Image: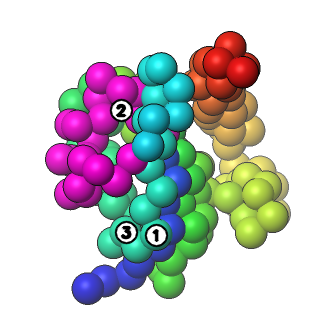
Amino acid sequence: MGDRCYMNVWVRKEHYGDFCDAIGEDHSAGESETQSWMRMQIPDVNYGAFDERLEAGKKGLIFFGTCSPGDTYDAEIFYSDGKEMHTLAVGHNGGYIVEMKNGKVAKGATAAINKFDKAWKELHEDMRKELVDQS
């Protein structure tokens, strides 16, 4: 059975069926969030469907979301820009987990987090604008 966790993910509607197939979920698992985005709440996904999400990102699918921690991994936020999937570990209170070496932030860690944070916010804002426009 493996390690199980909770996953919350938003997928571009045109990629929804392919994403469901990639992670092995039923196509009825999602709900329409906006005109362009579908939302899936999956309460029991094996290892956060990490490998499956990785492959979905390589296939050009656009999505973003969160996974709760499992027995052997931290909680994470993730997104796919249609080229590859990017992930960032987060603590229980939502803060980013930063790579440290010898008591100092590892070289490039801050720049990588800033790049991730910017892309995550852009995808999230794209979806949020549609929510505001619908109301």
Nearest the eye: 110 or 66: 66
Amino acid at pointer 2: Glu
Left or right, residue 47 beside residue 135: left
Nearest the eye: 91 or 12: 12
Residue 114 seen in the current view? yes
Residue 79 seen in the current view? no
Residue pointed to by mark 1: 43
Residue pointed to by mark 3: 45
Q: Residue at x 48, y 57 (%)?
A: 41
How far across and down, in percent of the image, does residue 29 sit? 34, 53
Left or right, residue 69 beside residue 107: left
Q: Residues within 10 Å of mark 3 (few under 14, many from 20)?
A: some
- In the picture shown, does residue 29 fall above or below 125? below
| Secondary structure of residue under mark 3 | strand
Query: Which of the two labelled residues, at mark 2 and mark 1, occupies the earlier sequence position?
Result: 1
- What number is the disc on residue 84? 2
| Secondary structure of residue under mark 1 | strand
Q: Residue at x 74, y 69 (%)?
A: 92
* The image quarter in which residue 82 lies: top left
Q: Do the numbered discs 3 and 1 sit on residues whose CB atoms are within 8 Å?
A: yes
